[in-house]
Image (spheres, rainbow, N blue to C red):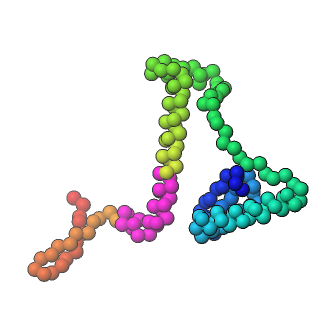
Amino acid sequence: MNKHAVCIKWSDEDNGFIATIPGIKALSAFGAKREKALSELKIAAEAYFEALEAAGKPLPLHEKITPYSGQLRLRMPKSLHAALSNGAEDEGISLNTYIVTLLSERHIEKKLLNKIETLENLLDATNSKGISTFLNSSQPTHKIEENNKKYKSKKKDR
């Protein structure tokens, strides 16, 4: 397991952490804490690799980090190529810079939209009752204290 990547994720269903080795579907371990899930995975992985060796089966290859060249050949419709070229020319930059800028902006936008959706779901889950009642009340309540008597009145729309 020394050269294999490890993934540790929280599981709501199991109410704990699940540790896995990407690419080995049948191998996982549970722990209430990350460290426990990792130590359990080490034990399970050793047994798994020993069983493979005993059966004469090949060990799974570990994933290596692949360096990216930063170059990509991309095919697109001629009309899109023309529109992008015109956009780059209007901005006074190269087509490459223009496309990288558009991709970067869209990538960031997508990440932000995902975060907003996650926050909205969290708000929906936590505020399903109490805050939604508060937010839906259209007439604020005001308290008036006079001569040691307390009165409540609804503010009227004018």
Q: Position of residue 78 (x, y in %)?
A: 63, 21
Q: Magenta stretch: residue 4 in it?
A: no
Q: Magenta stretch: residue 129 in it?
A: yes
51 sits left or right of 152 in the view: right
Q: Is residue 80 above or below residue 16?
A: above
Q: Examine the image and state in which quarter residue 154 appears.
A: bottom left
Q: Position of residue 60 (x, y in %)?
A: 79, 51
Magenta residues, start to end: 116-136
Seen as rendered, the residue at the extreme right is 56
Q: Is residue 150 above or below residue 37?
A: below
144 sits left or right of 71 in the view: left
Q: Give the residue at x 48% y 46%.
A: 112
Q: Examine the image and state in which quarter residue 10 appears.
A: bottom right
Q: Is residue 143 above or below residue 122?
A: below
Q: Main secondary structure of the magenta part?
A: helix
Q: Position of residue 156 (x, y in %)?
A: 23, 64
Q: Give the residue at x 84% y 58%.
A: 52
Q: Nearer the viewer, residue 131 or 153?
A: 131
143 sits left or right of 117 in the view: left
Q: Nearer the viewer, residue 92 or 65?
A: 65
148 sits left or right of 119 in the view: left
Q: Give the residue at x 64% y 63%.
A: 38
Q: Position of residue 64 (x, y in %)?
A: 69, 44
Looking at the rendered image, the quarter that the C terminus falls into is: bottom left
